Amino acid sequence: MIAARGAVAAAGGWSRSLSSFFYRRPNAYLLLLLIPPLLWFGTVYLGSLLSLLLQSFYSINDFTAEVVREPTLATYKQLITQPAHVDIVLRTTTMAIAVTIACACIAFPVAYYMARYASPRLKTFFYIAVLLPMWTSYLVKVYAWRLILAKSGMLTWLLDTLGLGPALDAALSTPVIGGPTLASSYIGMFIVFVYMWLPYMILPIHAALERVPRSLIQASADLGAKPGQTFRNVILPLAFPGVAAGSVFTFSLTLGDYIIPGVVGAPGYFIGMMVYQQQGTAGNIPLAAAFSVVPIVVIAIYLTIVKRFGAFDAL
Amino acid sequence: MRSSFDRPTILHRVAAAGGLVFMHFPVFIIVLYAFTTEDRTYQFPPPGLTTHWFEVAFARNDVWSALGLSLAVATCATLAALMLGSLAALGLARSRFWGKEAITLALILPIALPGIITGISLLAALKLAKVELGFWTIVLGHATFCLVIVYNNVIARLRRIPRSLSEASMDLGADGLQTLRYVVLPQLASALLAGGMLAFALSFDEIIVTLFTAGHQKTLPIWIYDQLFRPRERPLTNVVAVMVILITMLPIIAAYRLTRSTEERS
Amino acid sequence: MTAAIEFRKVTRSFGSVRAVDDVSLEVAAGEFFSMLGPSGSGKTTCLRLVAGFELPASGQILLDGVDVSDVPPYDRDVNTVFQDYALFPHMSVVDNVAYGLRVRGVAGDERRRRAHEMLALVKLADFGERRPNQLSGGQRQRVALARALINRPKVLLLDEPLGALDLKLREAMQIELKGLQRELGITFVFVTHDQGEALSMSDRVAVFDRGRIVQVDTPRGLYSRPRNSFVAEFVGGANVLSPKLAASLLGIAKPVAVRPEQMRIMSDGATAEPGWVICSGTVADSQYHGATLRVQVRTGDGELLTVARPESGNGEGATRTGSTVRVAWPRASVVELEAEHA
């Protein structure tokens, strides 16, 4: 291909030649762009995920405490049959569900206010007010709650000042979820979880509510519905995908967390802690891997359920 | 969704305000405790205020080395993420090919799956490959999700830049590299900056994956984590916590303002 | 003389859709050439093929007789005015216009001078320091024009540039563009879906339908001698009589076209003139257009005929909806069209 004068300007320089080369071969350009990041991502992230899955099919030799690299279902069997393990999964899942419900209940009024009643300026303020705690360091927030929930900490002081001291004691003496102090009880853990994931629930609900056109609410009122009816029949169903989307976050984040149960919580193990512990002192990577597969499977199931409620469109 | 004819009730206002207060007071508590005179920092309200603990913190070597490590890791991870994330975004923004949806989905995984999965996978893989845990394994873990953050920022911006702009540039005589330099990069600059700052802040604050891949190294969050079970050093921990708050929140706020201002301008 | 642009059996597909299907055409140097057609007809793709933003799957594209099928856009002596103007938002107006010179290495002062000259040509002399987002739609369009002309290309491509402007501005710009083209002597290739635009500005028009060129002709040729029913209806909105109706009225077994303004509604009791064709029907609807009145008449077979007559016409038949009327037109104004195939 000779570049001629006339309709074609004179070519020059290595940059032009390179560009022209890629002009004629768009696929080569695509490969050049995508190979470095995908190579990295594929080997580091996807590769390690696969190796995790692989190792969950290995087992540990009880005597030598070494990993036996032979495919077997023994580790999964161990996971499913031992009652202690099943307890862990149930405990974690129950907490995840409770946290999700609580977050939805607290987040909805806030998001509703933001979407329905706040002026545009107030709305920005609210938006930042919700985002700020999300941006604050995770560990610092957990640490803060440890201090607040401690026996002589802020929350106890607040409840005492309000005269609710006995109520706190009563709550703490509830079996299963109570404990010696807030900082070492499921109630305390529950509070911290709800606090941490609240912004993740507020934002999708707010986005879904924002998308409800004003005309729908007016049409509903026009057709004779009372405010409560409009809320129940028009707003709530349309906001539900936002709740579903937020629930994906709260559910999966609670399911996988291992730090909060360790810092603020009762002695019972959670999935995350189990994983962390098994790989650490016990060196039992196969069991840790098997335990990790549980949240993945649970989240996958949850996602398919939630997809039917339209959560993916609200994400 | 706003209508002019209804007004919020007192109940509405209280609920909304209550939610907000609930979300913010813990951080205020920490900042308050950083100044308390009582050395076990449980007491509320604090008996007195002092800046003594700040001096103590600044004199501690282990705090400085943890801080240094965190800064170094964050810088390396951010740089790697900026390069790889931008390449991925440029490649995926306007192309269509078989497998593109799968790749896009895969790129969401590090953020969609809980951190513990990333942590244990990396650890398992590293142990299998008999790699020693240290500085570079931490960077490896961080760079992976930082990559995703940069990618999301850049591709969001790229999608708002009309394709006709690069075509116009080439039409007027600029080749691919010139177009990149004069037209594409100036428009991406804010997204790159925002993505980079966000990645830096998240890497600096990272604890969940780092606990798995750090071996014996101590980043600042790991230092705090270890301190959680040492009641006598609590005031020191509070000061370091305030430090972490500042170092992570400021870049994130800056990144947010940057993204918003470019959105408004275009 | 060598054509400025030549397409030789060019094909371009997107997936399973043939956007450009075996298209061949020639555009003469210095011509104002329009590509007309509905959306999705392939006209914009053809334009992009000339510019170099798309590569042909088969066939050749020649500029000034040279095959440029795999020459990148920056090496073609062709410039484009985009539909969304594509002004660089991070540069001032004068920097936008000077861009073509900047990438060719022209020095700063020189290129700013020439950019200002260009801005004066499009009557935006004082707008140099503004940003694109501070300009109105019409002003942005002029900047896009100035930017595309600064390299003095042999061919200027315009992709529906007037679509976003309101009616009065559009008509003013049409006159300006035509004048500019005459003054500069550059070949203009103009893509539009508005047949009025194409007819008023062009030397020749190519009508596109589903990836193929149906007819290339002067505006008058297209209007008075459409080749098939698509062209007849698209350009000027002619009445197309089905072969069945044409056979019964005229003895022609093909579709035929008759312009609405050549039809008349006969007043009751009037006799037909020799050489005129008469068809009866009922008035279905009518629209008042200020200067004209358009009346839709439904024939016995259910076909709709549109009659356009000047509002000042008097002594002609009633046009109330539902009234029975007789529509007449001269035999000579009938244009035979190509037979339809699916």
Image (cartoon, helix red, strand yellow):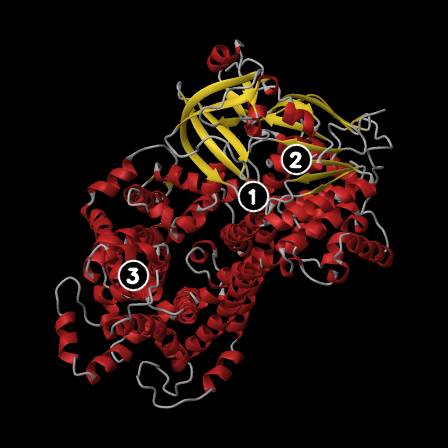
Say few, some or many: other residues with alpha carbon within 10 Å of mark 3 (under 14 / 14 to 19 / 20 or more). Answer: many
In terms of secondary structure, where does tag 3 sit? Answer: helix
CA gap, disc 1 to disc 2? 36 Å
Q: Residue at x 87, y 56 (%)?
A: C110
For residue C323, above or below residue B28: above
CA gap, disc 1 to disc 3? 41 Å
Are discs 1 and 3 located on one and the same chain?
A: no
Tag on residue C198?
Answer: 2
- Count every numbered label the image shows and give the total: 3
- Screen quadrant of the N terminus of chain A: top right
| Image location of residue C302, percent across then percent down | 40, 21
Question: Does residue C313 show up?
Answer: yes
Q: Nearer the viewer, residue C204 or B74?
A: C204
| Image location of residue B128, percent across then percent down | 46, 42
Chain at numbered mark 1? B
Q: Is residue B67 left or right of residue B121?
A: right
Chain at numbered mark 2? C
| Amino acid type shown at disc 2 | Ala
| Image location of residue C230, percent across then percent down | 56, 23
Tag on residue C129?
Answer: none
Residue labelled with disc 3: A261
For residue B226, above or below residue A230: below
Chain at numbered mark 3? A
For residue A185, above or below residue C12: below
Question: Does residue A22 show up?
Answer: no
Q: Nearer the viewer, residue C171 or B29?
A: C171
